[in-house]
Structures are given as C-alpha cells and as structure tokens.
Amino acid sequence: MLDTAKEKSRTSFDRQAAHYDTSSDGAHARSLYPYLLEKLGPLSYRALLDVGCGTGEILAQITARENVTLAGIDLSANMIAAAKQKLGERADLRVGDAENLPWSNDSFDVIICLDSFHHYPNPRKVLAEMLRVTKANGRLILGDLWTPPPVRQFMNLILPLTKGGDVRVYSEKEICALLKENGFTAIQWEMAGESAYIVTAASPAVK
C-alpha cells in the first residue's frame, strides 16, 4: 500500500510537471508561497532544503537572497527536470524519496515542505529524516492542505482510492503531535488562507 501511494504520486506529478506553475494543479501550492516567504523573512540561514520541491518555483523566489545554498528533492523526475531548467546550477536538485534524504546529518539551517506532506505514507520516517539533516536549532516550515471536520474525515476515507497519491489531510492537533513526537520543538500552527495551514518548528538546540 505504501509503495502504491508513492507510485500514484510519481505518476501524477510527472504528468503535471509541464504546466504545474500555471495550471489549477499547482494553484494551492502557489497560494502558500507568500506565507512561506513571510516566515522565512526574519530567519538567518545559509543552507535550505525544499522537500517535495516540485518545479522549484519557491526556490527560484528564494534565490534573491545572497550567499544561501539551496537544495531540493522530489519523487517526480519530471518535476526535477523542470526545476533544473529553471534553476540551473543555483540549487542542488535530486530525484528521491523524502523517507531517505540523500544528505548528511546537520546539513541545513532551514527545511521547507509545501503542499507535499499529505502525500507521505510514512510521515514519521519523513520527519525523522528532516530532523536528521537539520542543524541544531534549525527550522522547519511546513505548509499543507487543511479542511474542517467532518469534511476532513470523509476525505481521509476516500483519498487512498484516488489516483493522485494523496494519503492523509491532518488536523492541527495531529500535525503538531507528529512534530512533537519526532523531536521538534517550538511548534506554532496557523491558518494560511481558508484551505491551508502553515506550521513552524525548531530542531533541538542540542542534538
């Protein structure tokens, strides 16, 4: 079942890659960009990783910052190809699985993840990997789909049956609990528009 969700996601995003930046497929992700950039604004960082980076559009917007090393990973080869066309050598872009991030421990000051987390069949493994590659006292900024109950419960029943590789939409309580259980601290959750949330968290000061 886990691999099936990943394969659905890979197939779906391979198909969307060519028009993701302008079509309705990417509209929800694009709605989160201003919220993410606002959260990044006051942070001081030298290395940033985008997990589920898609076409690399938000990384392209972050390149305005000087002396920042950027990286991105996505399960879809077509998405990474689009990101490489856009970013060239300005970012380290790799095709890969968020459950096995191909970077060493303590590599990044900031990790971002937009409109991707609800596709992950093993969220605890993903969060463990995010924490592993984040430096001590680093930051995670995670934005994703939000729906109210009972709509959320209904969606979570039917999502495994759809073709997009969606797995689960999380409530505030659920996502904050997952972050805490997997070692993140200073967790702050807020709405981002009417159908999304953005949550920030920190890695421990001593890892």
Image (tube, rainbow, N blue to C red):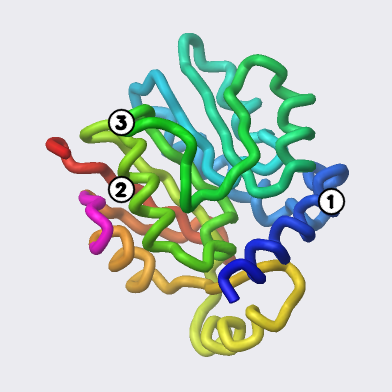
Q: Which numbered mark, 3 or 2, is in the foreground of this view? A: 3
Provide the residue designation for mark 2.
Answer: 201
Q: How far is disc 2 from disc 1 in space, using C-alphas?
A: 31 Å
The tag earlier along the polypeptide, 2 or 1, is 1
Type of amino acid at the residue the image marks with label 3: Asp
- The residue beneath circle 3 is 106
| Dot placed on the residue nearer the N-terminal end, 3 or 1 | 1
Residue at 53% of width from left, 62% of height from top?
120
Secondary element type, mark 2: strand
Per the rendered image, the range of residues in magenta is: 181-185
The answer to whether 21 appears left or right of 67 in the picture is right
Secondary structure under the numbered disc 1 in the rendered image: loop
Q: Circle 3: is it few (<14), some (14-19), or many (20+) Cα within 10 Å?
A: some
x and y percentages locating residue 64 in the rendered image? 58, 17
Residue 71 is drawn in which quadrant? top right
Amino acid type of the residue tagged 1 in the rendering: Ser
Q: Which mark is residue 43?
A: none
